[in-house]
Amino acid sequence: MKIWNRARSYLPSWFSTSKNNQNNNSNSSSENSFADLENNQPDSGDSNVDMAKESLSQLLEDTRVPDSVRDVLSDEYQQLSKMLEKLEKGHLHIAVFGRVSVGKSSVLNALLGKQAFSVSVLHGETKTESSEEWQEVDAGGIYLIDTPGINEIDGEEREQLAHEVANRSDLLLFVVDSDLTEVELAALKTVADTNRPIILVVNKADQYNEEEIFELRTIIRKRVKGIIAPANIVFTAASPSRQTVIYIDDEGNEKETVRQRPVDILNLKSRLWEILEAEGKTLSALNASLFAGNLSEQLGEKILATRKELGEETIRMYCVGKGVAVALNPIPIADLLAAAAIDVSMVIHLSRIYGLPMSKSEAGELIKTIAAQMLVLYATFWAIHFASSALKIGTVGFSTVVTGLAQGAVAWYSTLVVGRVAEDYLAKGKSWGDSGPKLIVQNILDNLDRDSVMSDAKEEITRYLKASKK
């Protein structure tokens, strides 16, 4: 979250996302996308890049991340290294997306001025991402990236690849050749969720007359309102079709010939040049910071999952210890003292797992809070626990074993509840959140099958006691 806030702190004035628009119930910020580029400070790009480098370096070098988590996210860490290298070299990536046969590769070839990308009529020709440097840009280090079609056979894998490329790219070109289909609109929204700026390229404009282009532009604007700003909807003819021309020869006869229409890519080039000249470095820095922010969130989730797994093992260990100790101890007061000591030790152990160490007094206060809510919610049940403890004084032999086993199971259950609630409290940074302790305890109790837990506890305690006698 810290990295994300830092990224947002230097977002260029034109940057907006569909999520923000939905939250604000307004499209005004989206329609100002890429606007007022000339108002940015000339040196802001360098400072943004420096901050992005710092963010990436901190993530790469963070020694607090467990090796197990780094292993799970090894691909992401490799991407992070490549992202940092890209920033160091000053490179900027522009990726293209779209359905099969809308002319994605043709658009890139037209920008490059050469046939660098395959434009085969066969579906699925672009099977993996490929890139080429756009040397026409004075600054250099600008790479154009082609991706598979979003509607191809086995498209899920290729669409995932396209989104991975989007997460590593600084600017996106989404190519269509008419009004957007539902598949295209859904894909556009998904790609827009990566929070990268997008230019919607309407290719094959040579197939429409001026009136049709005006009508198509109006329709598309309405369809993508809140996602793409009107200024970022551009029409191109990257690979125009041939035109049949009728002419009169010198003898007055009608003749027919075919001529190649000229490529029309100027609008797209102009828009890209404007953006790259004004915001090239900031785009790269923004993309890096967004990627770092996403990875930071993933790291948090993985670390929390690892802690939960360790926490569950720890809670179970203390459940066994407490259940057996209470079942074996014939003195009720000693039962209570042993139970309290075990629960305190468990909470202290959990606090260390979650990186929020607690003292004995803190752990004791937390347990008191949890116990108070448990008594409020299930007073009758816990009264039986104390009654069964008292029975130990006046019973011997088999009766003592029965009541001890029952009481051990109750102790197991109570420790499980305390452990789960303590975990929730620690996962929230030693906070009950907005819900408060009562609701959290209630949710934990509601999600536990008490009879099943106690039945399993009795079996486990019995097995442990039998094994210890051998």
Image (spheres, grey):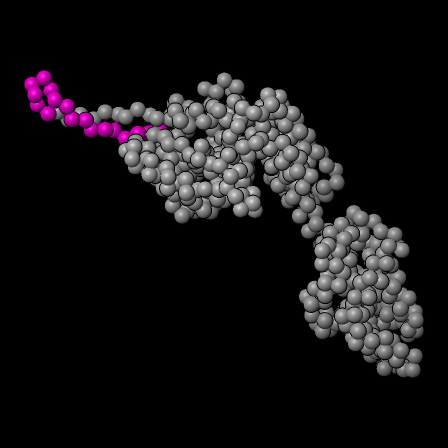
Q: In this view, does 152 lie above or below 393?
A: above
Q: Does any portion of residue 262 appear in the rendered image? A: yes
Which picture quadrant has residue 261? top left
Q: Tell me the residue at 82%/77% (across/down).
A: 384
Q: Does any portion of residue 89 appear in the rendered image? A: no
Which residue is more in the foreground, 179 or 261?
A: 179
Q: Where does residue 108 sit, x and y in percent of width and height?
A: 41, 29
Q: Where does residue 388 sit, x and y in percent of width and height?
A: 85, 78
Q: Tell me the residue at 66%/48% (across/down).
A: 301
Q: Say if the magenta span includes residue 253.
A: yes
Q: Quadrant of the N terminus?
A: top right
Which picture quadrant has residue 80? top right
Q: Where does residue 464 sit, x and y in percent of width and height?
A: 80, 68
Q: Say if the magenta span includes residue 117.
A: no
Which picture quadrant has residue 17? top right
Q: Give the range drawn in magenta.
A: 238-254
Which residue is more in the foreground, 163 or 47?
A: 47
Q: Tell me the residue at 63%/31% (across/down).
A: 10
